[in-house]
Image (cartoon, helix red, strand yellow):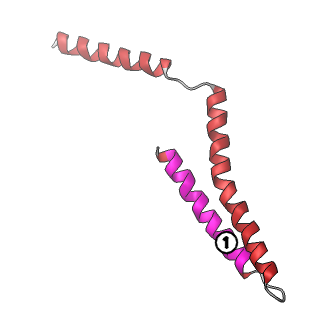
Amino acid sequence: MKLKLKNKIEYQAKRIQKADQERSSWLSQTVYIGTLGLVMVLPIIAGAYIGYWLDSLMTGYSSLWTLSLLLTGVVIGVFNVYFLIKE
């Protein structure tokens, strides 16, 4: 019984030491959050820009493409963030 407890304590101590060694710095966390922001925002901006360009080719006032591609950019951005966090 004592040997089992000793092994368990040693295992937990090794896990704690490993976690301390692999701890991220504030700079790496800042870069990671910035990457998440870019991965979210770039598809939204691209969708809005392309939609605005397509709407400008149409005669009359229309915002159909802008809104459609803006919402598509939001969906793509959310999936990008999800897959980046999942990794």
The answer to whether residue 21 is left or right of residue 76 is left
- Which quadrant of the structure image shows residue 65? bottom right
| Main SS class of the magenta portion in the image | helix
Indicate the secondary structure of the residue bearing disc 1: helix
- Residue 79 horizontal/vertical position (percent): 54, 58
- The 10 Å Cα crowd at callout 1, few under 14, some 14 to 19, many 20 or more, is many
Residue at the extreme front of the image, as rendered: 57
* Residue sitting at x 30%, y 15%: 9
Q: Residue furthest bottom?
A: 60
Q: Provide the residue span drawn in magenta.
A: 65-85
**In the image: residue 23, left or right of residue 17:** right
Q: Is residue 77 magenta?
A: yes
Q: Quadrant of the N terminus?
A: top left
Up/down of 58 relative to 52, above or below: below
Query: Which residue lies under the disc numbered 1?
Result: 69
Residue drawn at x 69%, y 69% is: 70
State the residue lying farthest toward the right: 60
Let me know if residue 51 is in the magenta part. Answer: no
Q: Quadrant of residue 55?
A: bottom right
- Place of residue 58 in the rendered image (x, y in percent of width and height, measured from the top left): 79, 85
Which three-letter amino acid code belongs to the residue tagged 1?
Leu
Vertical position of residue 46 compared to residue 1: above or below? below
Please give the count of numbered marks on the rendered protein. 1
The percent position of residue 37, horizontal first and vertical second, equals 67, 48
When the figure is inspected, residue 35 is found, relative to residue 14, above or below; the finding is below
Determine whether, in the image, residue 74 is placed left or right of residue 3.
right
Nearer to us in this view, 23 or 79: 79
Residue 69 placement (x, y as % from top left): 67, 72
